[in-house]
Image: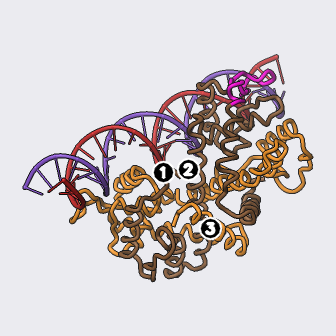
Chain colours: A orange, B brown, C red, D purple
Amino acid sequence: MSAQTRTAAEAAEVAGVAVEASTGPTGVAAGSGLGFDPIARAREQWVEQGWGPAADGMAAITSLMRAHQIVLARVEATLKPLGVTFARYEVLMLLWFSRRGSLPMKVIGSRLQVHPTSVTNAVDRLEDADLVTRSTHPEDRRAMLVALTPAGRELAERATTALNTEVFEQPDLGAEDVRSLVDVLTRLRRGAGDF
Amino acid sequence: MSAQTRTAAEAAEVAGVAVEASTGPTGVAAGSGLGFDPIARAREQWVEQGWGPAADGMAAITSLMRAHQIVLARVEATLKPLGVTFARYEVLMLLWFSRRGSLPMKVIGSRLQVHPTSVTNAVDRLEDADLVTRSTHPEDRRAMLVALTPAGRELAERATTALNTEVFEQPDLGAEDVRSLVDVLTRLRRGAGDF
DNA sequence: GTCCATTAGTAGGAAGTCCTAGTATTTTCG
DNA sequence: CGAAAATACTAGGACTTCCTACTAATGGAC
C-alpha cells in the first residue's frame, strides 16, 4: 500500500494521458480515483484490434499481476518493521510447522516452488540474522539441514500475528469473493500441475 | 512453465516430507502429482493453530502469490525467444497504444504503477536494444519522451501475437472461471484504490 | 523579479527471482 | 568393486523491484 498509493497529481497525469491516447468513451470519470479501470480499457483495445479471443485471458492475467503487486506491497509493509521479507517469512513458517523444526534445503525449495539458489539466498540472510542455523544432514552429507533458532521461532510467531491481524483478516473483499478467488486459483494451479 | 515443472523425483521428495511433517490424513495421494494441495494444507494448519479468522485470507493471498508465479513463468517463457521480458513488453504496448507513439517516463510509471526507477531501468534496456528512443519533451525540459522505433513497433506486434496464441487464449481455466477471476480481482483492485 | 518548493528523471544499493556452471557426495550399474 | 550418473548445494551473473539521494527544470509566493 505504501508505495502504491497514488497521489492526486499522479492520478491527474494518468487521466490526462488517457484522454489524449484513448478512443472510447473513457472520459466519464465517475466514482473515485481515475474513474476508469486501465485493465478494462486494455481489454477494449484488445477487442478493437481484433484480438477478441485473447481479450479475456489478457485481462485475467493482467489483473492477476496487478493484484499480486498490491497484495505483496501490503504484506511487505506489514513485515518490514519486523525485519523480514515475505520470502524469508515463508521459510520460517515452513520450519515452524515441521515436526523436527528443521528441513533440508531441497525440501524447502520444493515446498515453496522456488529455485534452489533462491533458497540458498534466503537461508543465507536468515542465518546472518541468527534466525536459523545450517548443519549437514547426518545421513546425507550433501544435504544441509536448516533449523529454527529460538529467535527465529519467536519472530515467526510475531510475524504471523502481524500478518493475520493486519492483512489476512482484512482482505478488502467479501467472504464470498475470498472463497471464490481461492476456488478459481486452485483450479488454475491444478491445471498447471501445481499439485 | 519451464522452471516450474516438477520432476517425479522432486514430487517424491515433497511427498516424503509431507508424510514426515504433517498431522492430517495427507498420504492419500490420489489423482495427479502430489495428490494434496499445499495451500489447503496450510489453511488447515492455520485453523488448528487457532488462527481461523485469518485462514481464508491467508489461503487467498498465498494462492494469489503462487498463481502469479505460475502465470508469470509462462509469459516469460513465451517472450524469451523474442528477447524481451514482460516488464519491457508492457512498456512497448503502452507506447504502441498511444496516439503519438510516445509518452513521458512519468506517464509510463503511472500507468504501470511501478517506481520511476523501474521505468528508467526498462527504458534503458529498450533503448540499448534500439526498440525505443529517448528525447526531451519540447514543452518541459525536465521530462523525457519515450518513442517506439520501427523495430520496437514490430517487436510489440510479434510479442503480442505470441502471447495471445500461446498464453492468453490458453488460460487453463473455463471461460466462466476467467470472467469470475477478473471480476473478483477488479473488486480487490478497486478496494485498494487502484482506480 | 528573485527565491523556494515541487516535479521529472537518474544513480547507486539492497533484495528477490531465475539461469548456468561448478563441487561434493551418494547411488546405480556393469 | 569401481566408474558413471544423479543429486544437493553454492557461486556468479542477469534482471526486476523498491528505496534513498541527487540534479535539472518548472512554477508559485512574496
Q: Main secondary structure of the magenta part?
A: strand
**Can you say whether A80 is above or below B56 in the image?**
above
Dot 1 lies on which element? loop
- Kindly indicate whether the residue at mark 2 contacts the one at mark 3 (C-beta within 8 angstroms): no
Horizontal and vertical percent position of residue A176: 72, 75
**Can you say whether A151 is above or below A85 in the image?**
below
Q: Badge 3: how crowded within 10 Å, few (<14), some, or many (20+)?
A: some
Q: How many marks?
A: 3
The residue at the point 57 percent across, 59 percent down is B65
Report the amino acid beneath label 3. Arg
- Kindly indicate whether the residue at mark 1 contacts the one at mark 2 (C-beta within 8 angstroms): yes
Left or right of B92? Residue C22 is left
**Can you say whether A40 is above or below B57 in the image?**
above
Q: Are marks 3 and 1 on the same chain?
A: no
Mark drawn on residue B3: 1
User: Which residue lies under the disc numbered 2?
Assistant: B73
Letter of the chain that mark 1 sits on in the rendering? B
Horizontal and vertical percent position of residue A50: 82, 44
Nearer to me, B121 or D15: D15
Verify whether residue B148 appears in magenta: yes
Nearer to me, A110 or A27: A110
User: Which residue lies under the disc numbered 3?
Assistant: A187
Nearer to me, B108 or A170: B108
Residue range corresponding to the magenta coloring: B133-154
Report the amino acid beneath label 1. Ala
Horizontal and vertical percent position of residue A32: 84, 55
Horizontal and vertical percent position of residue A22: 86, 40
Letter of the chain that mark 2 sits on in the rendering? B
Left or right of A99? Residue A29 is right
Q: Are marks 2 and 1 on the same chain?
A: yes
Q: Mark 3 to mark 1: distance in Å?
A: 20 Å
